[in-house]
Structure formats: structure tokens, C-alpha cells
Amino acid sequence: MGVCALFLGGAIPAAADPNRIVSLDYCADAYVLALAERDHILALSADAARPYAWGRDRMAGIAQHDGSAEAILDLKPDLVIHSGLEHLKSVHMLDRFGIEIIDIGYSQSLDHGRKALLKVGAALGEDKKARHMLASIDGRLMAAQKQVAAMEKTHKRPSALYLTPSGITTGRGTYIDEVMALAGIDNQLAENGVDGWSSVGLEALAAKPPAMVITSFFQGRSGWNNAWRFSHHPLAKRIMDRARRVEVPANQWGCGGFFLVEAVETLIAARIRDEGPRLAETAFIKGAGK
């Protein structure tokens, strides 16, 4: 069994009833919190309560670990779940001790998040719960697409630049780009032919200032002053002040996953709010997808 069985045979339950579960990183934490019985969760990652972790408001009272193999072995888990984001040395050590491990992979798309949800659901014996969650997500995405289609009958698609306080942004092919597209927003960097994660300089911003800026990770970053120097620059502040700005909570897309639908809904709600009453009347479909 072990990891090989999971890769060769697909999503196979780690045990008949795994009830001593540990997750190794904040992306994996989300799946454990969403699907596992609470009293079956031994510990979450050290980042589980961070502002960018989806489970931060759902993990009160659950222990956290430091990611070391020793700390996890002391917990005596029967199932460990991770996304490959960190603690890979611990993963190798735990595997040598015969502990069942599920690698859901680091997601860069909603589709990957969907597959990971089903994989974890199968491993936990929570297939029904996972399928129910997936049906709910699909319904919400369908409602979102109806809203976007209604908007596009009366309004031009906005173009926006995604921006973090350190100047990190994205072009085509990332989950941020996918979320923007699902919300009916064109990615300014993708339009310029940029692929993947990138950084934007002040000169580029000044040469082509965005009409709309989608920001995230601006909260809870005290103490990281060097990395966050970009957002404190007077020119960057002036450009962002002049642009239409939409803030997406970091925990809605701190990594790719099933919860990206929340970021889609946040962006659509911001469009409806900012683009006027007529758009709200046209686009807001009460109860769609429920």
C-alpha cells in the first residue's frame, strides 16, 4: 500500500476509518477541515491560522504542529495529507515509517481542486460529502456564469491588473487568471502576452496605469517590511489610489483549491456594486444555482 497504491490505483482509502489525521500545509488544511470529522483531526499546519489560509476561521481548538517528522510521529497519525508545498523531508521520513500519505498536489486550477476534493473524500470515507460539496460548487459557478453573461449584455468586460504588496502579479495560466476570467474580467498582463507568475515594476505601472487593480494579501503582513516595500512607494500608492480597486480576501485564493469559487463570487459582487444600479438589476440573479 502506501503512496504507490494511491498513484497506481487512484483514490484508495488509507484505512477503513482513518480517525487520526494530520495535514502538513495550509492548502492541505483546507481539505481536511472541509471533509474530516472534527474529532478525527489530530493537528493542522503551523500556517493554519494565517490570513491567507482558507481554514483560519474554522480551526479554532485544533492543535497545530511545526512540520517536523518527529512532531508528527509523536502524534501517531494513521493518515497524513499534504500538497507538496513544504515539509517534503518530513513526508519522506513519515513514508519510511509506514504512515499512509496522500499527496493532493499544489493546485493551479479549479479542476485540480475538484479532483483533490474527491481524492481526499475517498481517503477519508467521505465520498458523499465530497460529491455534495462539488455539486454545490458547480451550482455556484453556474450562477456566476449567468451573472457574467447578463453583465456582458450591457457592460464591456473590464480589464484589471492583479497586484500584491510586493509587486507580484500574474499573466496567463495561473489560478488567479482563471478566477478573473470566470468573473468576466480580462487580465491586463495576459493581454500583454505574459505567462505565469511575474513581477511588475514601477516604470511599467506608470507607463500603463491600470484602470482596475485587484489586490490581495495587503492584510496581516506586518514584519515583512523588505518584501512589502513596493506597496509603500509613493508612485505605487498614487497609481492604486487612482485606479478602481477591488480587494479579494487572501484566504479565498491563498492557494488553488475548491474554495476559489469564493474569490469568483467576491469579484462579481464587486462588479455589481461598482458598476451601477442598472448592472445590479440586470446581473443579480437571486437564488440562481441553489
Image (cartoon, helix red, strand yellow):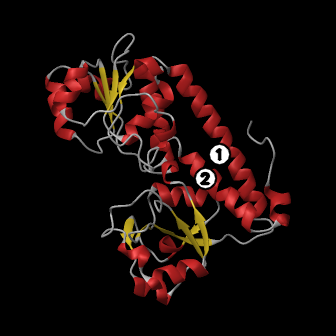
Q: Residue furthest bottom?
A: 207
Residue under circle 1?
141
* Tag 2 and tag 1, C-beta contact below 8 Å: yes
Q: Residue at x 41, y 28 (%)?
A: 62
Q: Can residue 99 be seen in this view?
A: no
Q: Can residue 14 be seen in this view?
A: yes
Q: Find residue 138 and report its image quarter.
A: top right
Q: Which of 192 and 20 is in front in this view?
A: 20
**At which x and y percent is residue 156?**
72, 72
Disc on res. 5: none
Position of 247 compared to 236: left or right? right
**At which x and y percent is residue 161?**
52, 72
Foreground tag (2 vs 1): 2
Distance (Cα) linking label 2 and label 1: 8 Å
Q: Which residue is drawn at 50% across and 34% down?
A: 58
Counting residues from the start of the chain, the first of labels 2 and 1 encountered is: 1
**At which x and y percent is residue 46?**
32, 39
Q: Residue at x 62, y 32 (%)?
A: 135
Residues packed near mark 1 inside 10 Å, few (<14), some (14 to 19) or many (20 plus): many
Residue under circle 2?
264
Q: Is mark 2 on a helix, strand or loop?
A: helix
Instruction: Determine whether 57 is above or below 76 in the image.
Output: below
**At which x and y percent is residue 97?**
15, 21
For the N terminus, give its image quadrant: top left
Position of 103 compared to 251: left or right? left
Q: Is mark 1 on a helix, strand or loop?
A: helix
Instruction: Determine whether 170 is above or below 178 in the image.
Output: below
Residue type indicated by callout 2: Val
Position of 5 compared to 28: left or right? left
For the C terminus, give its image quadrant: top right
Residue type indicated by callout 1: Leu
